[in-house]
Image (cartoon, rainbow, N blue to C red):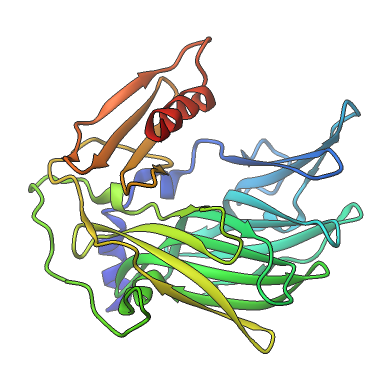
Amino acid sequence: MKRLLLVLALTALPTTLLAQTTLDRDVLMTPDGTLYTVESTLNDGAAAADVNMYLRLTAQRGTGQAQTIIVPDSVSPGVHSQPALAYDNDSNTLFLFWLHMPNAMSSELLLSSYRNGSFQPAVSLTNKAFHLEYNLRIKTSRRVGDEPLLVHAVWWEVTGDGESARYGLLGIEKGEVTSIYLDDLSNFLLVDQNDNPTIQGSTPFVVDANFNREILRHPTLIDTGNADSMDVIFGDVRTNSFNRITLQPIVQGRIHIPIGHAPGPRVGAPRSFIDLWSGSVDTIVNRDGSMLLYNPTPSAVNYIVYNASGWSAVKSVALSDKLSVDAAVAALSRMMNQ
């Protein structure tokens, strides 16, 4: 039965999950001036025929010559995509997260570390049958208790029982992962701002019959500048809503257990949203609670804004040789925070 439910759920997913024909990448600069770039690359014959996409890591320090290597554990059969980088300054260790889809019915979140010119074997954080993960995002925060580095990860998961936003918290010390915590983000809605048990309303917001729920499937990490906490905005396809929570990890021995509260009420999705957004959808927020969701394409950055007046219509910023995606997103961020 779960296999059948998962197949039915797959029909609602964007085709990019199964086709993965576009490149995706992440970039990170270390304190010593080394620029790391990782990208998911269509197999050009460098890997076996059953490898659809694999990962390349490029390192360049200053104006020195760039060095590119294939991530060893990304040449197993299937699709390796959505790479994300984190760095531990204390041990000069680069951490690489990515999603591996060996077939159309399963996927896993992988983690490998890179130090002194070599990769450690990848470990799977979410290796379960009939589970699909996608839309991965990570951010780091510096110190909770005695832990030098915390990595927060969010992604969307589809199983035979449904689909939801997921959260992972990894503690890193001296270049080694010392704790792993995984949970469904909706479980953090069960406490209020004073950490008292509560349950947010579960009545679905009304949306049009052709509403595109893809806009709800992109959880986002929001860095508020507080080293002890991280905010997350995530959608709920059951209630057609967005939720914002603040997660604050606490230390129990060497294991981090996050506690959370919702700083505000859930927000109903834009009921008439029917645009066929595909690829990444990210979020810009303002201190007043307003937020902007945007979807970059080769020709434009599409966006929609929520504020005290409700949702705006979908708008676009046209791209050109004089206006890149990064410049357009910077302009949108300035607009939201001026």
| Residue 208, image x, y percentages | 8, 47
| Residue 244, image x, y percentages | 35, 60
Q: Which residue lies furthest to the bottom in this view?
A: 253
- Note whether 27 is above or below 118 in the view shown: above
Residue at 30 percent of width and 52 percent of height: 216
Residue at 42 percent of width and 40 percent of height: 279
Residue at 16 percent of width and 71 percent of height: 202
Residue 129 visible somewhere in the drawing: no
169 relative position to 12: left or right: right
Please tell me which residue lies in front, 101 or 109.
Answer: 109
Report which quarter residue 25 is drawn in.
top right
Please tell me which residue lies in front, 142 or 212.
Answer: 142
Q: Quadrant of the N terminus?
A: bottom left
Please tell me which residue lies in front, 41 or 284.
Answer: 284
- Tally of marks: 0
| Residue 36, image x, y percentages | 76, 41
